[in-house]
Protein backbone atom coordinates (compact mmCIF):
# COMPACT_ATOMS: atom_id res chain seq x y z
CA UNK A 1 0.00 0.00 0.00
CA UNK A 2 1.52 3.28 -1.12
CA UNK A 3 0.81 6.50 0.77
CA UNK A 4 0.59 9.82 -1.02
CA UNK A 5 0.63 13.34 0.44
CA UNK A 6 -2.30 15.48 -0.52
CA UNK A 7 -0.56 16.95 -3.53
CA UNK A 8 -2.09 16.94 -6.99
CA UNK A 9 -3.38 13.52 -7.89
CA UNK A 10 -5.83 14.09 -10.68
CA UNK A 11 -8.72 16.10 -11.93
CA UNK A 12 -10.98 15.60 -14.89
CA UNK A 13 -14.19 17.41 -15.79
CA UNK A 14 -17.43 15.88 -14.61
CA UNK A 15 -19.53 14.33 -17.36
CA UNK A 16 -22.88 12.60 -17.53
CA UNK A 17 -23.03 8.83 -17.64
CA UNK A 18 -24.74 7.02 -20.49
CA UNK A 19 -25.38 8.51 -23.93
CA UNK A 20 -24.39 12.13 -23.37
CA UNK A 21 -23.31 13.54 -26.69
CA UNK A 22 -22.01 16.92 -25.65
CA UNK A 23 -18.77 17.93 -23.99
CA UNK A 24 -18.81 19.19 -20.38
CA UNK A 25 -19.71 22.85 -20.19
CA UNK A 26 -17.07 25.21 -18.87
CA UNK A 27 -18.28 27.58 -16.18
CA UNK A 28 -16.44 30.43 -14.53
CA UNK A 29 -19.33 32.10 -12.72
CA UNK A 30 -18.58 30.62 -9.32
CA UNK A 31 -15.11 31.34 -7.90
CA UNK A 32 -13.58 29.20 -5.21
CA UNK A 33 -13.41 30.55 -1.67
CA UNK A 34 -10.34 30.61 0.54
CA UNK A 35 -11.54 27.38 2.15
CA UNK A 36 -10.64 25.50 -1.04
CA UNK A 37 -7.08 26.83 -1.12
CA UNK A 38 -3.98 25.66 0.67
CA UNK A 39 -2.95 27.70 3.72
CA UNK A 40 0.36 27.85 5.51
CA UNK A 41 0.27 26.09 8.83
CA UNK A 42 -2.65 23.77 8.01
CA UNK A 43 -1.45 20.16 8.25
CA UNK A 44 -2.12 17.95 5.24
CA UNK A 45 -3.68 14.54 5.50
CA UNK A 46 -2.57 11.58 3.42
CA UNK A 47 -4.06 9.45 0.68
CA UNK A 48 -3.61 5.76 0.05
CA UNK A 49 -4.38 4.35 -3.39
CA UNK A 50 -6.08 0.95 -3.73
CA UNK A 51 -7.49 -1.36 -6.39
CA UNK A 52 -10.59 -3.50 -5.87
CA UNK A 53 -11.37 -6.48 -8.07
CA UNK A 54 -13.22 -9.78 -7.79
CA UNK A 55 -16.33 -8.03 -6.51
CA UNK A 56 -19.17 -10.34 -5.55
CA UNK A 57 -21.82 -7.63 -5.93
CA UNK A 58 -20.55 -6.37 -9.30
CA UNK A 59 -18.76 -9.41 -10.73
CA UNK A 60 -16.18 -8.84 -13.43
CA UNK A 61 -15.38 -5.26 -12.38
CA UNK A 62 -12.13 -3.64 -11.37
CA UNK A 63 -11.81 -0.13 -9.90
CA UNK A 64 -9.61 2.31 -8.06
CA UNK A 65 -10.41 3.86 -4.72
CA UNK A 66 -8.58 6.28 -2.45
CA UNK A 67 -8.63 6.72 1.32
CA UNK A 68 -8.00 10.12 2.89
CA UNK A 69 -6.91 10.27 6.54
CA UNK A 70 -6.53 13.64 8.28
CA UNK A 71 -3.53 14.35 10.45
CA UNK A 72 -5.84 14.69 13.48
CA UNK A 73 -7.05 11.08 13.23
CA UNK A 74 -6.58 9.17 16.49
CA UNK A 75 -7.01 5.41 16.16
CA UNK A 76 -8.34 5.22 19.71
CA UNK A 77 -11.39 7.28 18.71
CA UNK A 78 -13.85 6.46 15.90
CA UNK A 79 -13.67 8.92 13.03
CA UNK A 80 -16.58 10.16 10.96
CA UNK A 81 -16.89 8.78 7.43
CA UNK A 82 -17.66 10.32 4.05
CA UNK A 83 -17.86 8.31 0.83
CA UNK A 84 -17.61 9.87 -2.64
CA UNK A 85 -18.64 8.33 -5.94
CA UNK A 86 -16.53 9.14 -9.04
CA UNK A 87 -13.76 9.57 -6.51
CA UNK A 88 -11.12 10.86 -8.90
CA UNK A 89 -13.19 13.96 -9.68
CA UNK A 90 -12.95 15.16 -6.06
CA UNK A 91 -9.30 14.69 -5.19
CA UNK A 92 -7.41 16.90 -7.62
CA UNK A 93 -5.62 19.84 -6.05
CA UNK A 94 -6.47 22.05 -9.05
CA UNK A 95 -9.99 20.81 -9.74
CA UNK A 96 -13.44 22.07 -8.86
CA UNK A 97 -13.78 20.35 -5.48
CA UNK A 98 -10.24 20.15 -4.12
CA UNK A 99 -11.43 17.85 -1.37
CA UNK A 100 -7.95 17.36 0.16
CA UNK A 101 -7.53 21.07 0.85
CA UNK A 102 -11.14 21.57 1.93
CA UNK A 103 -11.10 18.73 4.44
CA UNK A 104 -7.69 19.74 5.76
CA UNK A 105 -8.89 23.33 6.27
CA UNK A 106 -12.27 22.58 7.84
CA UNK A 107 -11.02 19.82 10.10
CA UNK A 108 -8.14 22.07 11.22
CA UNK A 109 -10.59 24.87 12.07
CA UNK A 110 -12.87 22.33 13.81
CA UNK A 111 -15.84 23.21 11.62
CA UNK A 112 -16.40 19.60 10.58
CA UNK A 113 -15.51 16.40 12.45
CA UNK A 114 -12.34 14.39 12.01
CA UNK A 115 -13.38 12.47 8.93
CA UNK A 116 -11.95 9.59 6.95
CA UNK A 117 -12.97 9.90 3.31
CA UNK A 118 -13.25 7.08 0.78
CA UNK A 119 -13.22 8.18 -2.86
CA UNK A 120 -14.42 5.34 -5.10
CA UNK A 121 -14.38 5.13 -8.89
CA UNK A 122 -16.99 3.12 -10.82
CA UNK A 123 -16.11 -0.29 -12.13
CA UNK A 124 -14.42 -1.14 -15.41
CA UNK A 125 -15.47 -4.40 -17.08
CA UNK A 126 -11.92 -5.18 -18.14
CA UNK A 127 -9.19 -7.48 -16.77
CA UNK A 128 -6.93 -4.53 -15.99
CA UNK A 129 -7.44 -0.87 -15.14
CA UNK A 130 -6.69 1.89 -17.64
CA UNK A 131 -3.21 3.38 -17.07
CA UNK A 132 -4.64 6.54 -15.52
CA UNK A 133 -7.81 7.31 -13.52
CA UNK A 134 -10.40 9.34 -15.40
CA UNK A 135 -13.14 9.13 -17.97
CA UNK A 136 -11.27 7.60 -20.90
CA UNK A 137 -12.23 4.92 -21.44
CA UNK A 138 -15.51 5.54 -19.65
CA UNK A 139 -16.12 3.01 -16.85
CA UNK A 140 -18.59 0.64 -18.49
CA UNK A 141 -20.40 -0.31 -15.30
CA UNK A 142 -20.98 3.24 -14.03
CA UNK A 143 -24.61 3.74 -14.96
CA UNK A 144 -25.59 0.24 -13.84
CA UNK A 145 -23.99 0.81 -10.44
CA UNK A 146 -25.08 4.40 -9.91
CA UNK A 147 -28.44 4.89 -11.62
CA UNK A 148 -30.14 1.65 -10.57
CA UNK A 149 -32.68 1.99 -7.77
CA UNK A 150 -31.70 -1.00 -5.65
CA UNK A 151 -29.65 -2.01 -2.63
CA UNK A 152 -26.80 -3.35 -4.78
CA UNK A 153 -24.45 -0.39 -4.41
CA UNK A 154 -25.08 -0.05 -0.68
CA UNK A 155 -24.31 -3.76 -0.34
CA UNK A 156 -21.11 -3.23 -2.32
CA UNK A 157 -20.03 -0.51 0.09
CA UNK A 158 -21.08 -2.27 3.28
CA UNK A 159 -19.93 -5.77 2.42
CA UNK A 160 -16.82 -5.12 0.34
CA UNK A 161 -15.17 -1.66 0.39
CA UNK A 162 -15.86 -0.41 3.90
CA UNK A 163 -14.91 -3.65 5.70
CA UNK A 164 -11.58 -3.46 3.87
CA UNK A 165 -11.06 0.17 4.95
CA UNK A 166 -12.06 -0.67 8.52
CA UNK A 167 -9.24 -3.21 8.73
CA UNK A 168 -6.91 -0.20 8.96
CA UNK A 169 -9.01 2.57 10.50
CA UNK A 170 -11.45 3.08 13.35
CA UNK A 171 -14.65 4.41 11.75
CA UNK A 172 -17.82 5.27 13.60
CA UNK A 173 -20.86 2.99 13.45
CA UNK A 174 -23.12 5.96 14.15
CA UNK A 175 -25.17 6.50 10.96
CA UNK A 176 -25.33 10.22 11.78
CA UNK A 177 -21.54 10.23 11.47
CA UNK A 178 -21.60 8.74 7.97
CA UNK A 179 -22.12 10.85 4.85
CA UNK A 180 -22.16 10.01 1.15
CA UNK A 181 -21.76 12.25 -1.89
CA UNK A 182 -21.58 12.28 -5.66
CA UNK A 183 -22.14 14.20 -8.87
CA UNK A 184 -24.69 13.49 -11.58
CA UNK A 185 -25.36 9.73 -11.48
CA UNK A 186 -23.07 9.65 -8.46
CA UNK A 187 -25.50 12.05 -6.77
CA UNK A 188 -28.53 9.82 -7.21
CA UNK A 189 -26.35 6.89 -6.15
CA UNK A 190 -25.52 8.68 -2.91
CA UNK A 191 -29.21 9.27 -2.22
CA UNK A 192 -30.08 5.66 -3.05
CA UNK A 193 -27.52 4.35 -0.55
CA UNK A 194 -28.97 6.48 2.25
CA UNK A 195 -32.54 5.75 1.17
CA UNK A 196 -31.89 2.00 1.24
CA UNK A 197 -29.71 2.00 4.36
CA UNK A 198 -30.52 4.88 6.71
CA UNK A 199 -29.22 2.63 9.47
CA UNK A 200 -25.76 3.17 7.94
CA UNK A 201 -25.80 6.57 6.17
CA UNK A 202 -27.91 9.58 7.10
CA UNK A 203 -26.15 12.45 5.35
CA UNK A 204 -26.35 13.00 1.56
CA UNK A 205 -24.59 15.60 -0.58
CA UNK A 206 -25.75 15.53 -4.22
CA UNK A 207 -24.38 17.79 -6.95
CA UNK A 208 -26.25 18.01 -10.30
CA UNK A 209 -27.98 14.76 -9.30
CA UNK A 210 -29.46 12.62 -12.07
CA UNK A 211 -32.92 12.17 -10.59
CA UNK A 212 -34.20 11.50 -14.10
CA UNK A 213 -35.36 8.45 -16.03
CA UNK A 214 -31.99 6.89 -16.82
CA UNK A 215 -32.89 3.82 -14.79
CA UNK A 216 -36.01 4.96 -12.96
CA UNK A 217 -34.66 7.79 -10.83
CA UNK A 218 -37.59 10.02 -11.78
CA UNK A 219 -39.72 7.92 -9.41
CA UNK A 220 -38.02 9.19 -6.27
CA UNK A 221 -40.25 12.24 -5.64
CA UNK A 222 -43.34 9.99 -5.64
CA UNK A 223 -41.61 7.40 -3.46
CA UNK A 224 -40.62 10.12 -0.99
CA UNK A 225 -44.14 11.57 -0.84
CA UNK A 226 -45.89 8.21 -0.42
CA UNK A 227 -43.10 6.05 1.00
CA UNK A 228 -44.30 5.60 4.56
CA UNK A 229 -42.57 7.26 7.49
CA UNK A 230 -39.78 9.66 6.49
CA UNK A 231 -36.28 8.28 6.86
CA UNK A 232 -33.94 10.11 9.28
CA UNK A 233 -31.89 11.72 6.50
CA UNK A 234 -30.22 15.09 5.99
CA UNK A 235 -30.01 15.93 2.26
CA UNK A 236 -28.14 18.72 0.46
CA UNK A 237 -28.99 19.23 -3.23
CA UNK A 238 -27.21 21.48 -5.74
CA UNK A 239 -28.12 22.16 -9.34
CA UNK A 240 -28.26 24.96 -11.90
CA UNK A 241 -30.66 26.30 -14.50
CA UNK A 242 -28.16 25.44 -17.24
CA UNK A 243 -28.14 21.74 -16.42
CA UNK A 244 -29.16 19.05 -18.92
CA UNK A 245 -32.45 18.60 -20.74
CA UNK A 246 -32.46 15.44 -22.86
CA UNK A 247 -34.27 12.16 -23.50
CA UNK A 248 -33.78 11.07 -19.90
CA UNK A 249 -35.41 14.18 -18.46
CA UNK A 250 -34.78 17.72 -17.31
CA UNK A 251 -32.16 17.88 -14.53
CA UNK A 252 -33.17 21.25 -13.02
CA UNK A 253 -36.82 20.19 -12.89
CA UNK A 254 -35.92 16.80 -11.42
CA UNK A 255 -33.89 18.38 -8.63
CA UNK A 256 -36.67 20.86 -7.91
CA UNK A 257 -39.11 17.95 -7.66
CA UNK A 258 -36.77 16.15 -5.26
CA UNK A 259 -36.48 19.22 -3.07
CA UNK A 260 -40.25 19.79 -3.09
CA UNK A 261 -40.96 16.18 -2.13
CA UNK A 262 -38.37 16.14 0.65
CA UNK A 263 -39.58 19.48 2.00
CA UNK A 264 -43.21 18.28 1.85
CA UNK A 265 -42.30 15.33 4.08
CA UNK A 266 -40.35 17.56 6.49
CA UNK A 267 -36.93 16.17 5.71
CA UNK A 268 -33.86 18.10 6.82
CA UNK A 269 -33.11 19.35 3.30
CA UNK A 270 -31.33 22.27 1.65
CA UNK A 271 -31.33 23.09 -2.08
CA UNK A 272 -28.86 25.54 -3.60
CA UNK A 273 -29.92 26.45 -7.13
CA UNK A 274 -27.74 28.47 -9.46
CA UNK A 275 -27.21 29.14 -13.15
CA UNK A 276 -24.50 26.58 -13.92
CA UNK A 277 -24.48 23.60 -16.23
CA UNK A 278 -23.67 19.93 -15.83
CA UNK A 279 -20.27 20.27 -14.23
CA UNK A 280 -18.59 20.83 -10.89
CA UNK A 281 -18.07 24.59 -10.97
CA UNK A 282 -20.99 25.61 -8.76
CA UNK A 283 -20.86 22.53 -6.53
CA UNK A 284 -17.12 22.99 -6.03
CA UNK A 285 -17.48 26.68 -5.15
CA UNK A 286 -20.01 25.95 -2.40
CA UNK A 287 -18.42 22.65 -1.31
CA UNK A 288 -16.94 23.98 1.96
CA UNK A 289 -20.25 25.53 3.03
CA UNK A 290 -22.12 22.41 1.91
CA UNK A 291 -19.95 20.37 4.26
CA UNK A 292 -20.52 22.84 7.09
CA UNK A 293 -24.28 22.52 6.65
CA UNK A 294 -24.18 18.74 6.32
CA UNK A 295 -22.03 18.24 9.43
CA UNK A 296 -23.51 20.99 11.60
CA UNK A 297 -24.03 19.99 15.23
CA UNK A 298 -22.24 16.68 14.76
CA UNK A 299 -18.90 18.47 14.43
CA UNK A 300 -19.41 20.19 17.77
CA UNK A 301 -19.16 16.91 19.67
CA UNK A 302 -16.69 15.09 17.44
CA UNK A 303 -13.43 17.11 17.45
Image (cartoon, rainbow, N blue to C red):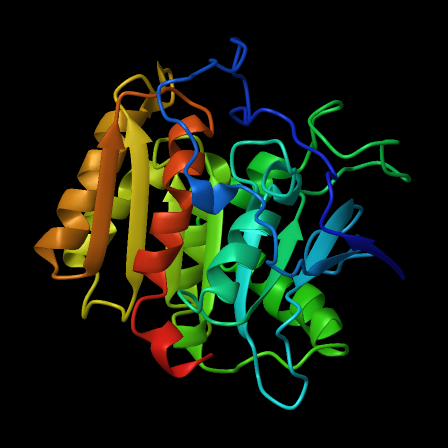
Task: Identify the residue shown where x is 63% and y is 58%.
Answer: 118
Q: Specify whether residue 66 is in view.
A: yes
Residue found at the far left of this picture: 264
Res 194 quadrant in image: bottom left
Towards the viewer: 88 or 126: 88
- Position of residue 242 relative to residue 272, above or below, is above
Percent coordinates x, y for residue 274 in the rendering:
25, 27
Towards the viewer: 103 or 50: 103
Res 211 quadrant in image: top left
- The answer to whether 90 appears left or right of 60 in the picture is left
Residue found at the far bottom of this picture: 76
Percent coordinates x, y for residue 53 in the rendering:
83, 53
Task: Identify the residue shown where x is 48% and y is 37%.
Answer: 185
Name the quadrant of the N terminus: bottom right
Percent coordinates x, y for residue 129 in the rendering:
86, 38
Q: How many marks?
A: 0
Amino acid sequence: MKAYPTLGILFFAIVLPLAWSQEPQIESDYPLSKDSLRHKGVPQGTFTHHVWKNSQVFPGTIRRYYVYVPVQYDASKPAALMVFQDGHTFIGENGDYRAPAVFDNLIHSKEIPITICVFIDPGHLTPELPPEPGWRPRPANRSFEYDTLSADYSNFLLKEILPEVEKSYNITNDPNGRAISGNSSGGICAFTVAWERPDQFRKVLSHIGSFTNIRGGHNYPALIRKGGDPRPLRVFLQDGSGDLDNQHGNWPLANKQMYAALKFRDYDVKFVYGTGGHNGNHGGAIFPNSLRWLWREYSLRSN
